[in-house]
Amino acid sequence: MAPVTSLSDSVQQHLATALSAALPDAGSADPLLRRSDRADFQANGILALAKKAKANPRELATQVVSQVVAGDVIKEIEVSGPGFLNITISDRAITENLAARYADTDRLGVPFAERPGTTVIDYAQPNVAKEMHVGHLRSAVIGDAVVQILEFTGESVVRRHHIGDWGTQFGMLIQYLDEHPHELDHKAAEVTGEEAMSNLDRLYKAARGLFDSDEEFKTRARRRVVDLQAGEPKTLAMWQKFVDESKIYFFSVFEKLDMEVRDPDIVGESGYNDMLAETCRLLEESGVAVRSEGALCVFFEDVKGPDGKPVPLIVQKSDGGYGYAATDLSAIRDRVFNLKANTLLYVVDARQALHFRMVFETARRAGWLNDDVKAQQLAFGTVLGKDGKPFKTRAGETVKLQDLLDEAVDRATTVVREKAEKVGLSEREIVENGRYVGIGAVKYADLSTSAVRDYKFDLDQMVSLNGDTSVYLQYAYARIQSILRKAGEARPTAHPELELAPAERAMGLHLDQFAETVLEVASAYEPHKLAAYLYQLATLLTTFYDQCPVLKAETPQQMENRLFLVDLTARTLHQGMALLGIRTPERL
């Protein structure tokens, strides 16, 4: 389908033509168009142009108005204040624009990005043999939404889950497993994620206890680390057991989150082992890194410790071991040269900002990143409890992600059950919708907050039917489906000849902004702006219901037009929520 020109773009073109006629020397001047509460749009660009041309802004505005072709799109245009233009769109233009979006069933008029490239996005990074906690939630949810949004705009996206699957702690675990070989055996053929985690947790605690209390075991465990790093086959086989057991658990959590995580996308720290020595050699030979007290370091003018001395990025330790920096820099090389990425995104806790700043700057100095290949951290804030402090259990421990999701689903199922009888939901639908509402509530609470800000985790508020929650949006969608089912023979049909009520106009103009919102969100990696757009759409829908009867409309044509308006609203809610990774049940 040909792309749909938005109303704001149409008005922009009309004004730019009129500006050029009134001020031939202005070139391609920007009318600075925006939505307004005084009219449908307001253009403020004439003030700056008049100043530049040493003209009276109000007189120039009047000249521009005389050049505007009114009719098909612009119904009225008037000069206001010192030289603003207030513009009202014709009802016909609104309905025709929406009809074009409605006909584009797959994309609702959202164009593809002009210059799509390849983005590697690093998100949802759990650690092997460790429970996932609430901090992993943000990385997973934000990352997954950005993946969906970028792919929808035509970007080629490579997902990477950089799991913590390497390091000295594995010596302790492997040695313990070697001495207690049946600790990870499964009694049943099918093992659940919870059982896998329980196995790992039990083994980890036992190994840790022995490591801390038995010097001889500690020595054997340290020797194991050397064997692991040397790639000794038996040691590697036992290490793989830990990775496989952890994946059973990871996949169960991601499935609960209603997220697709594929095995080939999981490339942990171990995936870059073969590159570490070469990464260090390249950095040292190019002079980007230098030896300092035996360690290979990169120094920065603007990074100093409390004593005023430079704090380096340590790529290789003095004992020959490699730090996180060596792995992260090797990953950059792989993503740029093998995966041919133009953009590298890292959805990582804001507290790691300094580390990534130093890693990216090192990669730039080495020539791996440049003007054509950029790396960016999508930093996110902390999840807080209702008390405004970092979210912990009553005992002061980190909250397990699995427990949190289960509780969200339980609360949501209670909310769904209260309304189920009225809608006639079966028990299977109650359980399924409870999942969609609970998981949607958790995701939306995260995504409706700007990623860099901390947010309060309050389940009562998240599953509330009132306020800025996903349940409010899901109910808006389900309510429209109910109306469409009750419409009988009447079909949603656009009638451009009809006048629109104020609530219809407001909703129509907002629906027109869906495409530009999606493209803006994709280019800035800001899912919270899409959440805000959808919430506003649902709010406008509520006003529309109060003021514009659909099934009891005055004429059959008006009923068809209103069915068309609510159906497009439902499709927009459905598509927008899907881009955030949230389901919209047909009946709630």
Image: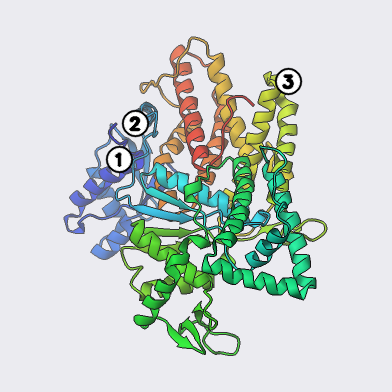
Say few, some or many: other residues with alpha carbon within 10 Å of mark 3 (under 14 / 14 to 19 / 20 or more).
few
In the picture, the disc for residue 93 is 2
Task: Name the amino acid, label 3.
Answer: Glu
Q: Which residue is drawn at 78% across and 56% down?
A: 393
Give the foreground label among 1 and 3: 3
Name, please, the residue furthest toward the left: 24
Report the front residue among 415 and 492: 415
Helix, strand or loop at label 2? It is: helix
Which residue is labeled 3 in the image? Answer: 421
Task: Name the amino acid, label 1.
Answer: Ser
Q: Residue at x 56, y 29 (%)?
A: 477
Q: Distance between the residues labelled 3 and 2?
A: 42 Å
Q: Which residue is drawn at 53% across and 73% down?
A: 323
Say few, some or many: other residues with alpha carbon within 10 Å of mark 2 (under 14 / 14 to 19 / 20 or more).
some
Report the front residue among 578 and 352: 352
Q: How far apart are marks 1 and 3 (CA)?
A: 48 Å
Can you say whether 431 is above or below 520 in the image? Answer: above
Report the front residue among 411 and 190: 190
Say few, some or many: other residues with alpha carbon within 10 Å of mark 1 (under 14 / 14 to 19 / 20 or more).
some
Task: Name the amino acid, label 2.
Answer: Ala
Asked if one can make out residue 126 in the rendered structure from this viewpoint, the answer is: no
Disc 1 and disc 2 in contact, CB within 8 angstroms: yes
Helix, strand or loop at label 1? It is: helix
Helix, strand or loop at label 3? It is: helix
Q: Distance between the residues labelled 1 and 2?
A: 10 Å
Name, please, the residue furthest toward the top: 489
- Residue 58 locus on image (x, y percent): 32, 54
Which residue is labeled 1 in the image? Answer: 10
Name, please, the residue furthest toward the right: 395
Label 1 vs 2, first from the N-terminus? 1
Q: In which quarter of the image is residue 177?
A: bottom right
